[in-house]
Image: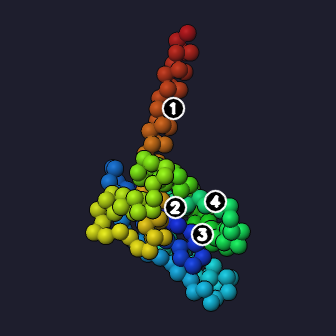
């Protein structure tokens, strides 16, 4: 499975493409899409869109994992990040790539098992899991890789839960047939 991890932003959007195969994850691509602050927001969003389309066409991910953001202080930041998220979701949907979202808490729990893990702990886990020589930089790229890894781990758990639920339903339905 190819997972495109995305940490949305207007100035910097972190990108990481992680290949997951039988419980082993490998980083295939990572970088930051940056937009100059002196450009109007419409042109920054267009640059983000075009860059993301190139990545989608180049790597053909099976799924995209985005950070589900929560802002409670700066409405202006929330608005522009929301616009970036909309452009990202548009590009993914146009290319028929399923989108899953994870909260920062879910990412921390998936990678460290601790909901109050700090940024450095997450970055160290990303480095360790992906067997990287150094921590990914900038932070947005490391966050994108963490989000992609969260999906790799969550996908397996959800797949097992669905299998158990289906197996349980089959057992229960056979009990009713025999009754």
Q: Which residue is the site of mark 4?
A: 70
As measured in the structure, the alpha-carbon distance from the residue carrying label 2 to the one carrying label 3 is 10 Å
- Residue 137 as seen in the image, left or right of residue 41: left
Left or right, 46 with respect to 19, comes to right
Q: Earlier in the sequence, mark 3 or mark 4?
A: 4
| Label 2: which secondary element | strand
Do the numbered discs 2 and 3 sit on residues whose CB atoms are within 8 Å? yes
Q: CA distance from mark 1 to mark 3?
A: 33 Å
Q: Nearer the viewer, mark 4 or mark 2?
A: 4
- Asked if disc 3 and disc 4 are in contact, CB closer than 8 Å, the reply is no
Q: Where in the figure is residue 146, as x and y percent of width and height?
A: 44, 60
The span from disc 4 to disc 1 (Cα, nearest Å) is 32 Å
**Residue at 53% of width from left, 20% of height from top?**
172
Most foreground residue, 124 or 118: 118
152 lies left or right of 36? left
Q: Quadrant of the N terminus?
A: bottom left
Image mark for residue 2: none
Regarding mark 3 in the picture, which secondary structure is present there?
helix
Can residue 26 be spotted in the picture?
no
Residue indicated by mark 1: 165
Residue beneath the point at 66% across and 72% down: 77
Q: 10 Å neighbourhood of mark 1: few (<14), some, or many (≥20)?
A: few
Sequence-first disc among 4 and 2: 2
* In contact (CB < 8 Å): disc 2 and disc 1: no
Q: Residue at x 52, y 12 (%)?
A: 178
Residue drawn at x 28%, y 69% is 133
Determine the secondary structure under disc 1. Answer: helix
The residue labelled by disc 2 is 64
Between discs 2 and 1, the one toward the N terminus = 2
Per the image, the residue denoted by label 3 is 88
Q: Residues within 10 Å of mark 3 (few under 14, many from 20)?
A: many
Whole-angstrom CA distance, mark 2 to mark 1, is 25 Å
């Amino acid at each position: 499975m190819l997972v495109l991890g995305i940490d949305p932003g207007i100035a910097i959007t972190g990108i990481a493409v992680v290949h997951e195969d039988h419980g082993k994850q490998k980083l295939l691509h990572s970088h930051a899409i940056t937009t100059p602050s002196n450009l109007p927001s419409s042109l920054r969003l267009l640059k983000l869109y075009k860059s993301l389309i190139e990545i989608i066409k180049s790597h053909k991910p099976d799924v995209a994992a985005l950070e589900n953001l929560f802002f409670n202080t700066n409405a202006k930041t929330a608005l522009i990040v929301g616009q970036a998220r909309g452009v990202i979701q548009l590009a993914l949907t146009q290319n028929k790539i399923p989108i899953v979202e994870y909260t920062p808490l879910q990412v921390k729990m998936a990678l460290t098992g601790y909901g109050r893990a700090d940024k450095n702990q997450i970055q160290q886990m990303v480095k360790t899991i992906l067997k990287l020589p150094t921590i990914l930089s900038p932070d947005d790229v490391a966050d994108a890789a963490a989000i992609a890894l969260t999906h790799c781990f969550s996908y397996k758990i959800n797949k097992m839960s669905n299998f158990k639920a289906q197996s349980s339903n089959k057992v229960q339905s056979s009990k009713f047939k025999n009754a």
